[in-house]
Amino acid sequence: MPFLNMQSVKASIKLAWPISLQQTLVTMLGMIDIMMVSQLGDAAVAAVGLGNRIQFVVLVIVMGVAWGVGVLASQYFGAGNMAKMRRSILMGISVAVLALIPIVLLNFAYADQLMGLGSTDNEVIGLGESYLWITMPSLFFIAGILVFENALRSMNQVKLPMVLSAIAIVLNIILNYWLINGGLGIEPLGVDGAAIATTVSRLMHLVILVGFLIAMKHPVKPSRHDVSSLRDIQAWKKLVALVWPMMFGFGVWSLGTFVYQLIFGRMGTQELAVMSVLAPVEGMFISMFFGFASACAIMVGQRLGADKIDEAWSIARTFAFLSPLVAIVGGALLYAIKSWVFIPFADLPASTLEMASDVFLIIALGAWIKISNMTFAMGMLRAGGETKACLYIDTTGMWLVSIPLTLLAAFYLQLPLFWVVVVSYSEEVCKLALFGWRVASKKWLNNLATT
């Protein structure tokens, strides 16, 4: 058996490029807000960046549910069982909504205190509080979008989510420009305008997606019979057993990313502004490879569901080799176009841009480690139901290794931002070793469709 499965490479590219492009567009939603408020100064950028990071903590938990639905859906699709796929969609949306209700309600009461954890600047706290009040309810819309999109991807239908994301991006840009700057009888709303634009574009995204599925009578559109199938207690147990480690693991990880943001925020408003600018830039670059991790999960999951274990391992081995190789080349190219990357942020102070330029080197050259970990965890281990192993590895790398070291570097040694970010990458190095070992063990090659 050749080390590289070229047929898998061709199939993965066909699946991956629309997913990667769509994920890049989704990441742009957060980046657009930051870009378009950068004219308002460091405080506005810091407020929107911190507000997006708080939302991200919650959103990633919902992503755990959606990804779990995608894992089951790909295996059910491989086994030819569409009824169970639709049932998993309904269950996933139900779990996501129930998880979001208390979180969104608590946000209205404690938004200012959440912002206060990440900044001591009263202007940043005030702007961020208002931003959270307006945008947090839109997470309900995203929950439905993510679950349906993961189900569609499990069937190899990746272009529809990409097209709808592009529409949402265009709508968000138009609304941002109008509401931030004012016009047509609307006073300039600044940061609030960016928040309203984001919420409206997310709502319209969901409405268009559901409307299309209904109009086309798509196979993933649940029916009344599918609603009645929700009475199956064993199906609930199976879904919950799969997704709770994902939800908890994604939550632990996203909470850790928020702690990093708090550390940068406590270092100063300028440091927070720098990381607020760079976080979506890094996110966009990594999202370009998200499609390959998703394609790996889809292809591996379909083979596991069809009980083709050797084929699943061959595909996984191909991705394990290619992901870091392509990411290293991509990171070098990203650094080569650094001057272009910073064009949208030209209105920021020169000292802020200089600090951001230094940290950008770490992001460009270290992204391959994050991309490799994403491929191992999302593309392989979770595709085989190894959600608990991913939870333990994420917790170890982030909370037992990296966060203590980063706190030490920032506040005890009082190192500059550049070196604090370098220390934070200890998480990825630790996880790379643990994920790689777990993948090589082959214990994750499990057929979930027959259990």
Image (cartoon, rainbow, N blue to C red):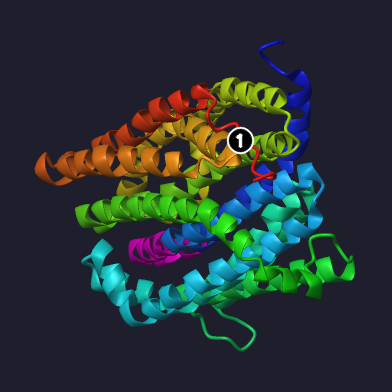
The residue nearer to you, when weighing 331 against 123, is 331
Quadrant containing the N terminus is top right
Tell whether 65 sits left or right of 423. right
Q: Position of residue 43 (x, y in %)?
A: 33, 65
Q: Does the magenta stretch include residue 41?
A: yes
Q: Position of residue 379 (x, y in %)?
A: 59, 37
Task: Locate residue 444: give its quadrant.
Answer: top right
| Residue at (37% x, 66% y) in the render | 47
Rendered view: 20 above or below 209: above
Residue, disc 1 = 446
The residue nearer to you, when weighing 236 against 290, is 236
Tell whether 295 sits left or right of 193. right
Tell whether 173 sits left or right of 435. right
Rendered view: 142 above or below 278: below
Q: Please, which residue is most extreme toward the bottom here? A: 185
Q: Please, which residue is most extreme toward the left here? A: 412
Tell whether 209 sits left or right of 114. right
| Residue at (72% x, 19% y) in the render | 5
Q: What stretch is highlighted in magenta?
A: 34-55
Q: Position of residue 294 (x, y in %)?
A: 64, 41
- Is there any visible trace of residue 198 in the rendered image? no
Three-letter amino acid code of the residue under disc 1: Asn
Rendered view: 358 above or below 112: above
Q: Where is residue 7 in the image (x, y as percent from the top left)?
A: 79, 22
Main SS of the magenta segment? helix
- Is there any visible trace of residue 95 in the rendered image? yes
Q: Please, which residue is most extreme toward the top here? A: 2
| Residue at (73% x, 73% y) in the render | 227
Q: Dot 1 surroundings within 10 Å: few (below 14), some, or many (20 or more)?
A: many
Circle 1 SS class = loop
Q: Does the magenta stretch include residue 197?
A: no
| Residue at (28% x, 44% y) in the render | 399
